[in-house]
Amino acid sequence: MRPTNDPIYPPLPCLAPATEPETAIGYGLRVLSFVLAYRCTATLSDADLELADHAYPVAVGGRDLLPLAANRLTDARHLILATLRARTAERQARAAQDARSVYPQGEVGQPGKFATLQPAPRPLAPQGVAIDPRPRSADIRF
């Protein structure tokens, strides 16, 4: 029988955090190389993935880059962008679910396309002043 405290799967690889003298591009390149090596984005934050995407043009900008290496870098960038899109969609779905729980009848924002339209209220005139109901037009003469 297997002990209960042993993990069933091996742990996911983790990237060391950015160091103080490391630049943003340097850290982005390190994140990009991590994704290339492990094909894992689960342990990286959105900011790390955005830095890797930002560093991608620097990585493929070399003159002596082989086409195979450029293809692998492009595959890593597609994985990064797919992860960012999925996380954004998940966040938006969670926010929409939260909005539905606050407004269960769908009263969020503007009424839908089948809502009855109400005419705009007429402005009230001060006491003793009559408002001309006719629309005004500009009197332009040349």
Image (cartoon, grey):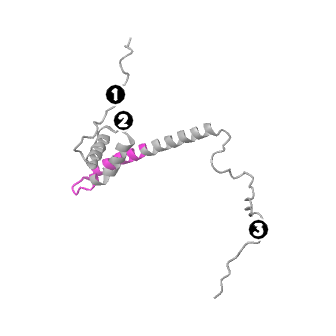
Which of the two discs, 3 and 2, labels the residue nearer the N terminus? 2
Whole-percent x and y of residue 1? 38, 11
Q: Residues within 10 Å of mark 2 (few under 14, many from 20)?
A: few
Amino acid marked by disc 3: Val
The residue at 71%/74% (across/down) is 136
Using the numbered discs, state the Cα–Cα distance from disc 3 to disc 2 in whole angstroms. 70 Å
Disc 3 is placed on an element classified as loop
Which of the two discs, 1 and 3, labels the residue nearer the N terminus? 1
The residue at 76%/72% (across/down) is 134
Which of the two discs, 1 and 2, labels the residue nearer the N terminus? 1
Q: In the rendering, which numbered label is found on residue 129? A: 3
- Residue on which disc 1 sits: 11
Q: In the rendering, which numbered label is found on residue 93? A: none
Amino acid marked by disc 2: Thr
The residue at 65%/51% (across/down) is 110
Disc 1 is placed on an element classified as loop
Using the numbered discs, state the Cα–Cα distance from disc 1 to disc 2 in whole angstroms. 10 Å
Compared across the picture, whether 34 is left or right of 97 comes to: left
Taking depth in this image into account, of 22 and 84 the one nearest to the observer is 22
Amino acid marked by disc 1: Pro
Q: Residues within 10 Å of mark 3 (few under 14, many from 20)?
A: few
Magenta highlight on residue 61:
yes
Q: In the rendering, which numbered label is found on residue 43? A: 2
Q: Magenta region: which residues?
A: 59-83
Q: Residues within 10 Å of mark 1 (few under 14, many from 20)?
A: few
The residue at 25%/52% (across/down) is 66
Q: Which of the two marks, 1 or 2, is nearer to us in this view?
A: 2
Magenta highlight on residue 97:
no
Compared across the picture, whether 106 is left or right of 21 comes to: right
Disc 2 is placed on an element classified as loop
**Can you say whether 38 is above or below 28 in the image?**
above
